[in-house]
Image (cartoon, rainbow, N blue to C red):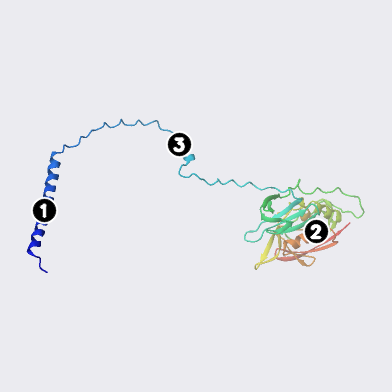
Amino acid sequence: MKIAPRHLVWVNLVLLGLIAYWGASTVSTAVAAKLTPPPQVRLVQPPPPMEHGPRRPVSYYAAIHQRDIFNSTKPEPDRPAEPPKPTELKLKLWGVAIHDGKPSYCIIEDLTTRKQELYRVNDKVAGNVTVKAVEWDRVILDRDGRDEVLELATPQGGPLPARPATSAAGGAGSTTASPRGTGSSTAAGAGQTQGGNPHIQQVSEHHYSIDRSEVDSALDNMSQLFTQIRAVPHFEGGQSTGFRLFAIRQNSLFDNIGLRNGDIIQNINGSPINDPARALALLQELRSAHQLNVQVLRNKETVNLQYNIGG
């Protein structure tokens, strides 16, 4: 398409006008920049340096920490847990047995029914009361979600005092017992009272006669009885085979009936003693028993101890 000469003249005039306007604008901007005076700058004197106050302790700034403007809502501080209070239940703790890696247990008596039972952790004692933990000298009870403490019964005094000698017929002769070791004794001590106690008499080497009153007195004072001896389960091949005795107090009931440190009680009247509950049950059966046969392992030899309970 060809542009007519008449139109071409008009196009050239427009282009010339645009060029002239751009040139005039540029010149006017440059002239204005030269003619405009520079702005006035006023300098202000700097403020005097701040004076540093005296050095203050950290407690002076505690208010800033307490206000803590960046944390307007704070969680309530953890309250220290209150120690468990002694239980008001009519219960009495007679003894505990602590084992590493094995269930511990305790012996608790219900003072209302006068019945003693063996309890392990998580066993129910009465109603909603559960054994929560067994410790060295106390038991923690969980009573309706609240912890309570049952302290170990404190024995009063030492061993039971010997009763005065009676003038009954057939009484014992000498009141001095022969020395006792871990070995076997001789039959020469037959007919002697043991430890100066006229209610216990050695009939032969492994045969003893015990008055019923002596057994009843011992069972009525279990707290003192448990301080005269210590017993721990004895295991062979991973199985409990009895209870090993140690820390037998001299002239105590256990000492007077011929038991020795290191003896392992294996069975009583033919019943194996491999469970604490069974041992406790047999202890209670002594109130009505007339004869007791105890098999112990002493120095790797089996010894049968016989006891006649009467009077």
Among the two numbered marks 2 and 3 on one chain, the one whose residue lies closer to the N terminus: 3
Image coordinates of residue 175 in percent, x first then y, are 83, 51
Residue at 80%, 59% in the rendered image? 284
- Under mark 3, the amino acid is Tyr
Relative horizontal placement of residue 262, taking residue 160 as reference (left or right): left
Residue 126 drawn above or below residue 80: below
Q: Relative to 194, does residue 41 appear above or below in the rendering?
A: above
Quadrant position of the N terminus in the picture: bottom left
What is the C-alpha distance between the residues marked 2 and 1?
131 Å
Q: Residue at horizontal 11%, vertical 48%?
A: 24
> Which label lies toward us, 3 or 1?
1
Query: Which quadrant of the figure contains the C terminus?
Result: bottom right
Q: Do labels 2 and 1 touch, CB within 8 Å?
A: no
Between residue 148 and residue 242, name the one nearer to us: 148
Q: CA distance from mark 2 to mark 3?
A: 70 Å
For the residue labelled by badge 3, is the local secondary structure a helix, a strand or a loop?
helix
Q: Which residue is mark 1?
A: 17
Asked which secondary structure carries label 2, the reply is helix
Q: Which residue lies most toward the front here?
A: 6
Q: Earlier in the sequence, mark 3 or mark 1?
A: 1
Residue 149 visible from this viewpoint: yes
Q: Where is residue 127 drawn, in percent x and y?
A: 74, 56
The amino acid pointed to by label 1 is: Gly
Q: Tell me where residue 281 appears, x and y as whole percent.
A: 78, 61
| Residue position for label 3 | 61
Q: Residues within 10 Å of mark 3 (few under 14, many from 20)?
A: few
> In this rendering, is residue 44 above or below 176?
above
Left or right: 220, with 63 as reference point: right
Asked whether the beta carbons under mark 3 and mark 1 sit within 8 Å of each other, the answer is: no
Q: Would you call the spot at circle 1 few (<14 residues within 10 Å), some (14-19), or many (20 or more)? A: few
Q: Nearer the viewer, residue 163 or 72?
A: 72
